[in-house]
Image (spheres, helix red, strand yellow):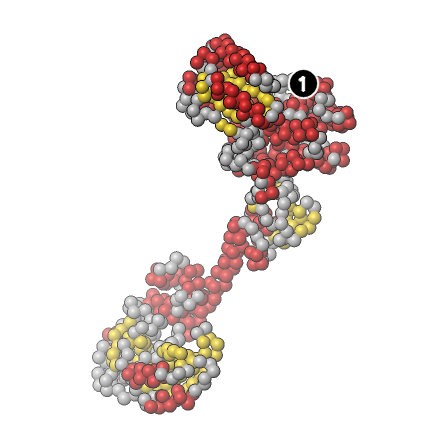
Amino acid sequence: MQKDHTYDELRQLLSSYISEEQLLNVDSYYEKAKEVYNGLKRKTGEDYINHSIRVAYMLAELKMDYVTIGSALIHEAITLERMTKEEVELFFGEETATILSSITKLSHLKKTFKHDNDTEKYRRIVVGLSENPKALFIKLADRLDNLRTVYVHDDEHKKEIIEETTNVFIPIAHRLGIKTMKSELEDLCLRYSKPVEYQEILDKISADKNELEGSLKEMKEEIIELLNDHDIKFDILSRVKSVRGIYNKLAAGKKWNDIYDLLGLRILVDKTEECYLVIGLIHSKYKPIPKRFKDYIANPKNNMYQSLHTTVFGVNGRMYEVQVRTHEMDEIAEHGVASHWSYKEKTDGSKKGEVENKLEAFRTLIELNDIEGNIDFFNNLDTNLNKEEIYVFTPKGDIIELPVGSTPIDFAYKIHSEVGNTCVSAIVNGKIRKLDYKLHDSDIVELKTQAGTGPSKSWLDFVKTDQAKSRIKSFFYKQDKERLIKTGEELLINEIKKRKYSPSDLLKPDYLSECIKSLKVDDEEELYMGISSLKYSPNIVVNKLIQCFEPKENHDLDKLLNNSGNTKGKGSVLIAGYADLLTSIASCCMPVYGEDIVGFITRGHGITIHRSNCPNVDLNSERIVKATWNDEQKDKFTTSIHIYIDGSNEKLIDIITAATKVDVNIVSINYKKKTKDGDFYEIICKVKDINTLNLLIVNLQSLKFVNKIERGITK
């Protein structure tokens, strides 16, 4: 039910706890509010200003300061575009401008999250956007007043309001400890979302009302007599549990008779030690229910709530929940952090700075998942000021969530990859900032982009988000990929030309497809990248393309044999037993007599002889033929070895001497310095057979300055 209040009633309430000077300041807010809301009507048909007066009155009941009350009177001035933030600051100062700006951002937030189901994230952002925590109190009061009149809206809008209140604002009210607001918000949400269940519980309470109130009155009188007998100064309140509270119990599976706290009494005393004395007296008269005693004075809840709770068997055999706390504790329990603020200011004249700090810390640390175990919340503010996200704005008012430490580049990539890639400068709150500038809550960020530009690898040193890092790396991977593809294609074309073929003949789509399938790569780009990264030799790829281009021509062994003479030739290699076929020793692997060899049929150049383990030949190719050495040959064979040495010992004479001892002729010696594997000598030599070469290698390995020896090979 909507509770109407006039400005005079508000002023009278305020005069009970703020000074005359502050009251005059509130008057100035009210005069501006009349101007701001002039001519505006709410959906209920009433003047708009009535809503703001009711919001302000709710906050006055919490004894909020005059700035909060004044801000509440004009809280929608910016949202309704009746004032700018600059105008608010000019009239009422920076604090009020910040409060109203936060409320406006929260209004934008609702539009942003209209189709987002991440309510936990929504709650977190609501708190994060409240630059001044007083904005949260105003927003809660605003929501409560709107919920009281939600019946004027259609079902869809009503559902949105109830869901948002349940998932966002009720948890915030709980964490702020504002029980009065929280309870009414819960009750109204239940009333409109589950009207049947709500009415059933209401009817049940009404049916038992006389009996319940009679028992409660009798129990209350007995406790009053008990405490008076012990000269304890106290106040006592009683209540029947709220509809929402009962619904929660029933929804959890409890039966009506199992609701222990259906009837409740609250006893207020002056001193903490009196709380324990009262509980002791009650337990001495009434039997307590086991495990129902809770000491929230020694172990406060993390929203500052303190009280002693117990449940006892009392009058008429009913169970009664009894809460005992001091008056100050009750103020905090009912009105949360706001009451702690006003209570401290009222009782000891202390400044608001301390509690404002608590409010600010609360805004940063608030946890909306109902974690009750964090009892040291307000005792450890200095060590817990950790916030993981900030919320910044586009010039159009869209909200972007980023981790703390983010930069304009993180912001740019959050908007779009192309915006990030082409970003060249940033303007933050109207000032040009470097791209590594650390953004802050509520910054307004405008980006300047330039087509044709790209990111810098140095950005990886300061960007915060994984998204930005991934997009930057992706950009350079794509650039490197294009370069590798181009290089691989050039290497393949050069090898084709070297083999006396035309690229246009071999690089036809069908031939490339067969080659890609044979090498088990995904596409042409991967093939070229494999060539440029030396994963595939251009020679092997060309061989496969040639097989497609001329699958029968020139590699038909019968044709070669028909053109040959007989087996009595002088060749050093036999192909299928024939010695007079055109053969040549491959320059890439330089096989020597006695090694396992194979023949590869080339186009127009006869058969090339390779070592069987040469990486440049595909043993599964149709162009491979069996080859053996001709035992009648008398030639020496040219090959190469690489001798890796200790650079401080250049002993050429020792190398030459070792070769001479085994009848190996050295053709040339080339010194290769600072290679990947170290310095080495490339020795081109002529040997009789593989046994002679192996003997030379053994002799060379015995030299102290030799680290290792490898057979030379050209890819």
Q: Secondary structure at mark 1?
A: loop
Q: Nearer the viewer, residue 72 or 528?
A: 72
Vertical placement of residue 611 versus 67, above or below: below
Whether residue 681 is visible here, answered yes or no, is: yes
Whether residue 165 is visible here, answered yes or no, is: no
Query: With 492 as the anchor, is 323 left or right in this view?
Result: right
Q: Nearer the viewer, residue 439 or 247?
A: 247
* CA neighbours of label 1 inside 10 A, class few (<14), some (14 to 19), many (20+): some
Q: Nearer the viewer, residue 370 or 491?
A: 370
* x 73%, y 34%: residue: 88
The C terminus, quarter of image? bottom left
Residue 42 lies in quadrant: top right
Total number of numbered discs in the rendering: 1
Residue 540 lies in quadrant: bottom left
Vertical placement of residue 513 versus 145, above or below: below
* x 78%, y 27%: residue: 21
Vertical placement of residue 661 versus 256, above or below: below
The N terminus, quarter of image? top right
Residue beneath disc 1: 5
Residue 574 position within the rendered picture, expressed as x and y whole percent measured from the top left: 25, 80
Amino acid type of the residue tagged 1 in the rendering: His
Query: With 304 as the anchor, is 259 left or right in this view?
Result: left
Q: Nearer the viewer, residue 73 or 65?
A: 65
Residue 569 position within the rendered picture, expressed as x and y whole percent measured from the top left: 24, 85
Residue 35 position within the rendered picture, expressed as x and y whole percent measured from the top left: 74, 26
* x 46%, y 81%: residue: 647
Query: With 412 as the anchor, is 611 left or right in this view?
Result: left
Residue 322 position within the rendered picture, expressed as x and y whole percent measured from the top left: 51, 20
* x 44%, y 71%: residue: 494
